[in-house]
Each structure stands twice: as structure tokens, then as C-alpha cells.
Amino acid sequence: MTERLLITRLGQRGDGVADGPGGPVFVAGALPGETVEAEVEGERGRLVAVETPSPSRVAPFCPHYGRCGGCVMQHADPATYAAWKREGVVAALRHARLDAPVEPLVAAHGEGRRRATFHVRRAPGEGRPVAIAGFMAARSHEVVPLDACPLLVPALADAPALARALGEALGGAGKPLDVQLTATAGGIDVDVRGHGPASPSQRRSLALLAERLDLARLSLHGDVVVERRPPLVTMGKAIVAPPPGGFLQATAQGEEALARLVVEAVGKAKIVADLFAGVGPFALRLAERASVHAVESDGAAMLALDRAARQTPGLKPIGVETRDLFRRPLLGPELARFDAVAFDPPRAGAEAQARQLAGSAVPVVVAVSCNAASFARDAALLVAGGYTLARVTPVDQFWQSAHVELVGVFEKKRPGQRRRTLG
């Protein structure tokens, strides 16, 4: 059913929102102030035509926009886009009844995303199925085939072709594959998921393919098939070789922006805990001025961090601990020795650890998050425990998507201590 709708605002996922008689209607590709025609089914509307375009409307820069689900706001100008992303953080804090200044959005796309995961599937071809590689369509499990993605760093310009080649080599099992490609100083690091263990002959074929494709490293489910060159990443003064399939921030500039905010917030603290530390994007930079205790559940990441720390001159000591902070958060007596704590959990947040921090006397806590809702929940726990949420800074490394990173700085005044001035 086609309806004429007036778009009044943007939703959290970038959809234009109209107020219909039965409730809100979400229309992808529409902007506030526009009158549009849309085919409406339930709460969703498919944009048919824009009758009165917004002055904020611009032409998308990718030919796949609208089908590929990776981007949601290429049709909006930079000011509208930045305001929408920041408002998502403001709304999450408001929902949790948290009052804190929210800084302007920090642009952190840089040269582009240094890592991407392509979904590889089999599709009908001339005479036999062929591999296709791409991203999922919006609200769908359908793969949109891609030859290029303008959001990636130049080193990943051939990423879809590399993913297809690996899909062809592993296509005999007919399984859907996820191919993660990361641009590193040593070349492209690839981890393939979904295939399962490879036979000795498959491993030999994959090693030869890695040679032909000039990959730095190729692994299956984290199991290294061949490493031709170390896949190295610079973090502050240190050079890290992440474990196969390990986590990295999406963009180099995003990592630098988040780390800068963490280091600035910690200030002159002498002993710092870095929780959910990964391979050390914060710990290695913090150690340029403070002793650091890094905690992470991934043992391989801890080994990579420890190796990088030992090989980097001029750093203060970094202690590493492999520990599941969801099940075994650092407790009050363990937290008592730290002048500051930084934590950067997965999207689910760090509720158990936040509860322990809330009851502690750590003067400064810095929370990094990729999910405004779970951040707000954890922040509310800290505030209830006596912390002041001094500021929140949204960081945009997932350009054109609905995802936003953020850094929140919390202060707790010790008895007889003056309030610390941030800056």
C-alpha cells in the first residue's frame, strides 16, 4: 500500500521516521522535513519517491548504496550525519537518566577501514556454481556481490577478489564462508571462518594460493596455514603482531582517537589497569607514561601484547593477565592499587566489572564502548556508586553506518581529595 508520509526525524538506524495513525513508520533513505511516497507494511516503509527533498539530501557516492546494508546515511550531508550520530549517544544517556556533556562527534574514518569481513557464498554460474563475495543486504541474509568498497583503505582495494578466490579454493564443501581481511604493514592478513578443518592437501593448495595472492598470513578459524610475512600493526611506539583473527579497531585513526582520549583522561596516573585490553592499543600507549596492568580473556592477544611490550624500549612495565572479566571481574581489593582504570568491553558491555568499579575508590575510570545502550547501563551503575560522568565523546570510525564508538570519563573524589580537573 503506497502512502504519502511526512518525515519528522531520524531513527537510531538512520531511517526517516513518520508518525502514522498506527504509530511510527520507518523509511530507509528518507530525511527529516521530506514528504515521501512509500509502500507501507506494518512499521516499515519502502521509499518510492521523494516529493519534497530536504536541503540536506546529497547524492550517494557508492553505486551499491540502497542494496548493500553496510551504509545507511550516504544520502545525508555531513552536518546532518554528524548531528544524527551524536544524538544517538545523547538519547541513550537520556534514556538512562544520565546528565553529562556530550562533545562534538570526532571524525575518525581516516584513510578508511583497515579490516573487513566479506561473506562468500556459492551462486549459479555458467555450467557450475561460482563464488560471490560481498556484504549482507539491509535486514536480510542475502549477500550483495561487490567488486569494491569505497570505505576500505587502498590496501584492501582487491579485497572482494581475494575473498572470491579463497571461496573458489574452499568451495567444494559448499559451506557459507566469512573471510576477514586486515591491512597490515606486512601485507594482507586473512582469516577464513565457516569451512572447518582443512585436509593436508587443502592446506598445501591454500599455501600456494596465499603465495599467488601475496598474502602476509592465511589462517582457518585462527589456525595458521601459512605466514609469509609477519602482519604487523603500529600502536604508539610499539609494533604488534596480532593473533590470527584477533580483534583490531576498524580504522587506524579511530584507534588513535580512542587511545588519545583514554591517555588524556588518565592524565598523570602512575598505575593504570587496562581491562578488556585486547592486543594493547591503550596499554602500549599508556605505558609511555605509567605502569599498566592489562587484563584480557584471549590468551593469544595477551601473548601478542606481552611480546610487543618486551620488544619496545622506553615503556614502563606492563603486566598481563589472562582472565574472563565477565565471570571474574577485578574485585575491590584488586582495584584499590590503581590510580585509574580504563575498560573497553565488547558490545554487551561490562556490567559485572562496572558493579565492582562502582564500589571502588579508583579516582578515574575511563569507559570505551561501541554500544551506546550498554555504555549507558554501565555508566548508570558507576554514577549510582558515587562517580560523576564528567564528559562523553562520540568517535566515528564506522563512517556511514549506525555504529558509533564513545569514550566516557568518570571521576570519584577520595576523602580529603580535591576534585581533579579534566583536560
Image (tube, helix red, strand yellow):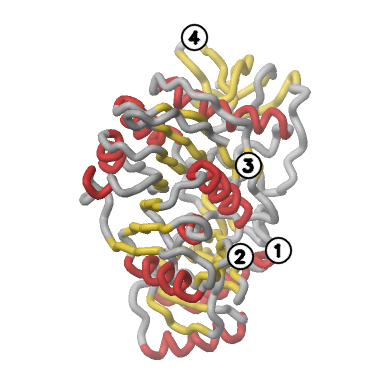
For badge 3, the amino acid type reads Gln
Q: As rendered, which of 262 and 34 lies closer to the eye?
A: 262
Please provide percent x and percent y for residue 15: 57, 29
Hey, which residue is sitting farthest front in the picture? 416
Look at the numbered discs 2 and 4 and tell me whether their residues touch, using CB distance below 8 Å: no
Mark 4 vs mark 3, CA separation in Å: 31 Å
Dot 2 alpha-carbon crowd within 10 angstroms: few under 14, some 14 to 19, many 20 or more: many
Q: Residue at x 38, y 77 (%)?
A: 223
Q: Residue at x 71, y 48 (%)?
A: 62
The quadrant of the picture occupied by the N terminus is top right
For badge 2, the amino acid type reads Pro
Task: Answer with mark 3 or mark 2, whichever residue precedes in sequence.
Answer: 2
Considering the numbered disc 3 on the image, is that residue within a helix, a strand or a loop?
Answer: loop
Considering the numbered disc 2 on the image, is that residue within a helix, a strand or a loop?
Answer: helix
Q: Which residue is mark 2?
A: 160
Q: Which residue is mark 3?
A: 400
Q: Residue at x 41, y 27 (%)?
A: 388
Considering the numbered disc 4 on the image, is that residue within a helix, a strand or a loop?
Answer: loop
Q: Which residue is mark 1?
A: 154
Considering the numbered disc 1 on the image, is that residue within a helix, a strand or a loop?
Answer: helix
Look at the numbered discs 3 and 2 and tell me whether their residues touch, using CB distance below 8 Å: no
Look at the numbered discs 3 and 1 and tell me whether their residues touch, using CB distance below 8 Å: no
Q: As rendered, which of 329 and 55 lies closer to the eye?
A: 329
Confirm whether residue 146 shows in the render.
Answer: yes
Dot 4 alpha-carbon crowd within 10 angstroms: few under 14, some 14 to 19, many 20 or more: few
Task: Answer with mark 1 or mark 2, whichever residue precedes in sequence.
Answer: 1
Look at the numbered discs 1 and 2 and tell me whether their residues touch, using CB distance below 8 Å: no
Discs 1/2, front: 1
Q: Which residue is mark 4?
A: 21
